Image: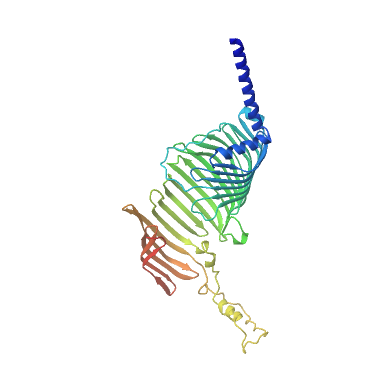
Amino acid sequence: MTRRILLWTVVALLALLALLGGGAWWLLDSDGGLRELAALANRYSDGMLRLGTTQGRLLGEFIIKDLHYQGGDGTRVDVERVHLRLAPRELLSYRLHLEVAEVQGLQVSLPPPHQTAPSGETRLPSRLPFDAVIDALSLNDFQLHQPGETEPFRITSAALKGSWIGEDIVVERLSAELAETGPLLLSAKARMADDRIVFSTLNLKGPGEVDGSGTFAFGKSANDLKLSWKDLRWPLTGDAAERLASGVDGEAKFSGPLDRYHVELSTAAVLHKLPIQLAAKGDGDLQQIQIADLGLSADKGSAHVQGKLAWAPLVRADLKGTISQIDPALFAADLAAPCVPPSAVPAAKAAAAPPTMQQPTGERPALPPRGKAKADAGCAVGSGPSSINGSFNTQTTVQNGQTDIAFTANIDKSQLRGYPLSLSAQGDTDTRSVRLKQFLLQSGKGSLSATGVVGWAPA
């Protein structure tokens, strides 16, 4: 009797396991099972997850339309259509292999940020719980809504092919199109650790090209990252004739831990059709940088800045700089004024003047007398070279937790379109307004002086 009871118990358990296994297989590997899973999610997720129509099987290829997620923190995700095809057998080897992944109409709305205390050093996942292989992922019409922003961040289209196997990440191709940049194409190979990413190759193509290699680290680990770029431009999109800067080529080196980093940069560019050279080096941390030298060279002119610049916990600027023979047309193309000889000015005025009785329309102008003409010396007033020479200095003090940056600026022995130019300014700012103690601008016979307060934020 006991044996019979034990036998029937074993048979019942096996039958129950077979039933459960068959039911699970039906849920995972049938069209009706996927519809039932969607119904269960809609019923028992308490409104957090809602799925519309489904088609296909979960362990294979399926389509879900009208997927909505509402998080407890206010995060909202809406998807018009998801189409996935995976290799189910590879799941037994702890590998998620997506042969096809198509996402259409993805909108993500983020909640207002919460002030949280730092939890310590940043730690990265060196590997996933499973390997991931993506043969073809496409994303169309992505929108990211952020608090305080009137317009969402948009990605018209994007595509990815890559893998994350163990600690190795390979991005064979990541393409995207943004309104701000136009088409972009990224490829990279990197090895992950919990405190660093080691790039063997990194290449970004778009409005120009950027290459990189080396280590980008967090916490106390040392960085050793090298970047180079060529043919960058600004604006990133638009006609070539409207570009302010083009032909931007250069390189940068970033070394040391984030709390004691060292950076060096050198680049060349064409700014307002004038070639320039820019070089910088300094040391800093996540709150400030000590600029050993920031130098700009353009034709015969140069400018240099040294000092400390901080952005946390308070804004500070303790800087000094010098300017020597800088052409202001670098910053405003309208200030360029080619030299016009004095003798050409009356001729130009006469050519532009309407015809008179003494100069009938169509009358052939008189020829100049024979012989050698004498060259004119200098430039006509209002034309000619522009050159800025001067210096500036800023010094920061903190009173009752508020920043006050005092500044002085002097420009002398300078020219603007051939006119003498000088400037003397002194004042201070709390980053919300400027208090001018002295401001005197002189050019030619004219001058402008001012004192007072100019504000751009509520007191």
Q: Nearer the viewer, residue 61 or 171?
A: 61
Residue at 67% from the left image edge and 38% from the top image edge: 62
| Residue at the limit of the structure toward the left, as seen here | 400
Answer above or below: position of 77 versus 319: above
Q: Nearer the viewer, residue 262 or 20?
A: 20
Lateral position of residue 263 relative to residue 77, left or right: left
Is residue 260 something one can see in this rendering? yes
Residue at 56% from the left image edge and 61% from the top image edge: 272
Query: Which quadrant is home to the C terminus?
Result: bottom left
Q: Nearer the viewer, residue 362 or 201?
A: 201
Q: Quadrant of residue 84?
A: top right
In the rendered image, residue 53, in percent from the top left (x then y), is placed at 65, 43
Figure label count: 0
Q: Quadrant of residue 189?
A: top right
In the rendered image, residue 230, in percent from the top left (x then y), is placed at 59, 50
Task: Please say which color scheme the image uses.
Answer: rainbow
| Residue at the limit of the structure toward the bottom, as seen here | 357
In the rendered image, residue 8, in percent from the top left (x then y), is placed at 62, 15
Is residue 170 something one can see in this rendering? no
Residue at 64% from the left image edge and 23% from the top image edge: 18
| Residue at the limit of the structure toward the front, as seen here | 1
Q: Nearer the viewer, residue 330 or 89?
A: 89
Query: Which quadrant is home to the N terminus?
Result: top right
Residue at 60% from the left image edge and 54% from the top image edge: 179
In the rendered image, residue 141, in percent from the top left (x then y), is placed at 62, 50
Answer above or below: position of 285 versus 379: above
Answer above or below: position of 430 versus 438: above
